[in-house]
Amino acid sequence: MITRALDEKIISSCFKDKTILLLGPRQVGKTTLLKEIVKHLNVSSIWFNADEADILEAFSYAVTSTQLIQLIGTNNKLVIIDEAQQIPEIGKKLKLIFDNRPDIQIIATGSSAFDLQNQTAEPLTGRKKTFHLFPLTFKETVNHTSLIEAKRLLDSRLVYGFYPEVVNNPGNEKEILIEIAQSYLYKDVLQIDNIRKPSHIEKLLKALAFQVGSEVSYHEMAQIVGNIDTATVEKYLDLLEKAFVIFKLPAFSRNQRNEIKKGKKYYFYDNGIRNVLISNFSLPEIRQDKGALWENFLISERLKQNAYNQKFVNSYFWRTHDQAEIDYIEEADGVLYAFEFKWKDQKVRFPASFLQSYPEHQTAVVSRKEFEEFVGL
């Protein structure tokens, strides 16, 4: 089994007077990770899966602290509630358990941030610690095998991505990815009552998949999808972000005259999902979109590593109206770190207008020849 970066972090956070929330998309290994944590902690525990009808019903009817304590039992020290976003008023119920049984460690998982985080925000203020789990990282695969082996498989990872089941079943990647996309990708988004046309979500995601690395126009997206307006496009994109399918990179600007100020790009948390949407599983070297594959891989890896390492940075892209651009920028402690992504190793001249406008900067080119440091190795 591949050891996850969050394993020790969650273990060390247990029994520290905090309810633990573990958020992340379906099929990224939350259940597998928690089973390992249960083994390590070696205390009496009980596990609830709120996707199961009887569990959901039991928690729906348990509204008092007495009823909730009866559900979890008096002897259990570790309580895991999987897919907790399904349970009505879960935040208040977690607070009741926490307040009445402070000796218990509660871990609640969720595959939709818009439900679980919103429901727990106020009731668990000061009482929770939140972790995000993503598809496997390149670093996790290196630690499981070796750097040489991980680099040998890099082309495959750029195509099929890093979902654990995909990585653990070589030869069946395509079939597994299609199943993940069809059965799990939109599940939480489509449970929202006022989304009645899944085809709109699918068309929108497909359009985004073709535009990785390019600025996205809500107006253009509305025209591509058809029969929806820009406000609906923006709403759907927000829901897809909160369901951990995509994430947004805003434009960087400090009000220099020629900078694009309101631009945005969207990337996928996993290359494999992006390739399912466009039905392209060709190897990178023969593809016209290999630059987009490389860019999506690098930015998603950086996002995952920053989250796991609790590195708090602001992330952007940069572009001017006369088409000067930088692929990726991080802002940390007053310094701008500018990165250009290239499929092949080559010299890059960073725009003079950026270098002159922002003297507190560092620049680097990330190519297939040298990328390890950028992804956390």
Image: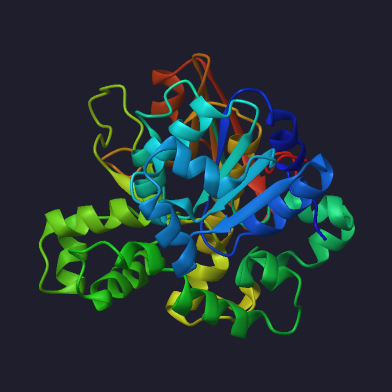
Where's the N terminus, which quadrant? bottom right
Left or right of residue 83: residue 248: left
Q: Residue at x 58, y 46 (%)?
A: 72
x, y (%) of residue 104? 64, 33
- Residue 368, horizontal then vertical, whole percent: 70, 55
The reply to whether residue 356 is in sight is: yes
Question: Residue 53's spot in the image, x, y percent?
Answer: 44, 69
Q: Camera-side residue: 39 or 324?
A: 39
The correct choice, above or below, for 77 with respect to 162 in the image is above
Return the residue nearer the eye: 331 or 345. 331
Q: Is residue 370 visible?
A: no
153 relative to 350 in the view: left or right: right
Number of marks in the image? 0
Residue 116 figure quarter: top left
- The structure residue drawn at horizontal position 51% and vertical position 69%, both measured from the top left corner, is 273
Q: Is residue 11 above or below residue 99?
A: below
- Which percent across, then down, holds residue 336? 50, 23
Of 363 and 236, nearer the camera is 236
Q: Quadrant of the C terminus?
A: top right
Residue shown at 76% from the left, 48% from the top: 38
Up/down of 138 relative to 160, above or below: above
Depth check, front residue: 370 or 298: 298
In the figure, residue 246 lies in which quadrant? bottom left
Residue 73 picture quarter: top right
